[in-house]
Image: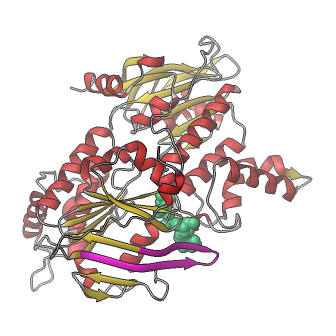
Amino acid sequence: MRTSEDMDEVDTGQHQLSGDLPVLSLGNVSKTFAGTQALESVDLDIRAGEVHALVGQNGSGKSTLIKLLAGYHQPDPGSVARYNGEEFHLGQRDTSGFSHIRFVHQDLGLVLEMSATENLALSAGFITGTSGRVHWKEQEERTKASLARLGVDLDIRKPLGAATPVERTIVAIAAALTGWESGRGLLVLDEPTAVLPHTEVDRLLEIVRGIQRLGASVLYVSHRLDEIFKIADRVTVLRDGRVVTTKETVGLNTQSLAELMVGERVDAAFRLARSPVDAEASVLAVRDLAGGTLRRLTASVAPGEILGIAGFTGSGSEVVPYLLAGARPATSGQVKLADGKWHPASRLRRSGFPLVPADRQREAAVADFTVAENLTLRVMESFSRGGALSAKREADVVREWIKKLQIKVANSEDSIMSLSGGNQQKVIMGRCLAADPSVLVLAEPTAGVDVGTRQAIYELIGGLADRGLAVVVTSTDTTDLIALCSRVIVLSRGEQCSELVGDAIDEHSLLAAMEAGTP
Ligand SMILES: Nc1ncnc2c1ncn2[C@@H]1O[C@H](COP(=O)(O)OP(=O)(O)OP(=O)(O)O)[C@@H](O)[C@H]1O
């Protein structure tokens, strides 16, 4: 059996074939922020034409490494970087290495009000005549050619706000690759599938394979371990800023990779043991609820129940959390709250059920606030004593939730923006739970959250449900629904198409139910 000592053994796995010069070679790369050593003596080689995955728990240093490559951070002295054997300066954008490395960051960097053509023109430059007028026809030809190179045919005139998430990601990749005709560089994809539904993930992976076939190398960051095995040739595992190992993916599996990341045993197929609930005793019920892509939903959730809502993008599932939490207006329907009476669904606007939204950076984190302030935002009032805030009570809550959710932060007075993405998600989750609600609404609760912390989050939600919390959860990651839910309602084209209960909730049945409702 593998011990944690074995896991700590450093195996660089970088047995180069003779003449097999790495495209990118990093040596002794370190990065220290005030109070945090984010990276420590990292060595990493990326071979020509390989897809190389980079994995690690939240806060292990993946984004910091990418930001160093992108010239966003300066490395500590002593760090060495080479592109095709030629040394270049990390932390500087205008060096030769940099021009060969292209990036698609998590936020994609697109303007959603603009079309694919306009977005590509923004990154590659507008084609203009002597009068300065933009040659749109040529611009469109260029966009089509860029997308055709990826084997994609999209409506290049519609605003990207109306495109599907995977179409947006594809446009971001095309934008990143403009002017890269040789196709021999390195493309860095930072969690490209964090909120993509299963079907769209496969489409994206096919595009990544196409890029690899062009001769490029890809550095691929993801928390979805099943993808690593579908796409990557090798994987490097970071833990606490250090490289634990670089290995061929052949010979690893989800379980062993999860354990390398965490450094101890984890159950990659974790599932909560749920006791039956009294289905009659609803704490929140909706009748014919509609709004956005949701045309009609009739459902109720009982105290202690974890109800899942599943469906592909556009099925209506993605708007349910926002309607229930009153963050988006319902256009029709009724709601029954704790008073046991039916009200117009507009009443949800005042119900104030806490919501963990899908896009924490845009919708939830208050960027100017500290970690402590973000954690206690919803419970501020209960701390007030005669107008003054009970600092001790606040500090207790902050400590409690940092511990319960294993939030990696040097100091709770640090800005939330200094936290890694997954740790920001945990702060938002803690904020909602600290308010001790009767209903909790979760959209993509584990997007960007590592495999070890996922289980901690599942167990925490399960424990709260055992004590009576009703939870409604939507997720594009079926792992969440399987691990958490005792019942899942499947939506298609805005309406309920089926319901799965208990042990019937598994990967195969969920996908089959979602596909069955799709035209
Ligand atoms: N600008 C910054 N200032 C201070 N600390 C930072 C800053 N950026 C990152 N850190 C710290 O460096 C460590 C590594 O963070 P990083 O974002 O690289 O992790 P990650 O592996 O990308 O995590 P995730 O999977 O959650 O995105 C964390 O402890 C983080 O809090």
Horizontal arrangement in the rendering, residue 360 relative to residue 495 (left or right): right
Q: Magenta stretch: residue 76 in it?
A: no
Coloring basis for residues: secondary structure
Q: Can residue 518 be seen in this snapshot?
A: yes
Count of number-bearing discs: 0
Residue 481 on image: x %, y %: 46, 31
Q: Residue furthest right?
A: 386
Residue 146 on image: x %, y %: 12, 63
What is the quadrant of residue 147 in the picture? Answer: bottom left
Q: Which residues are magenta?
A: 23-42
Q: Magenta stretch: residue 27 in it?
A: yes
Residue 240 on image: x %, y %: 54, 64
Main SS, magenta residues: strand
User: Which image quadrant: the C terminus?
Assistant: top left
Asked if residue 468 is positioned above or below residue 457 in the image, the reply reads above
Asked if residue 431 is positioned above or below residue 408 in the image, the reply reads above
Near-viewer residue (41 or 458): 41
Near-viewer residue (382 or 506): 506
What is the quadrant of residue 489 in the picture? Answer: top left
Residue 359 on image: x %, y %: 47, 51
Asked if residue 18 is positioned above or below residue 487 in the image, the reply reads below
Instruction: Residue at 52%, 55% (x, y): give it.
Output: 422
Instruction: Residue at 51%, 52% (x, y): give it.
Output: 262
Q: Can residue 70 be seen in this snapshot?
A: no
Asked if residue 30 is positioned above or below residue 219 in the image, the reply reads below
Near-viewer residue (453 or 153): 453
What is the quadrant of residue 157 in the picture? Answer: bottom left
Near-viewer residue (276 or 247): 247
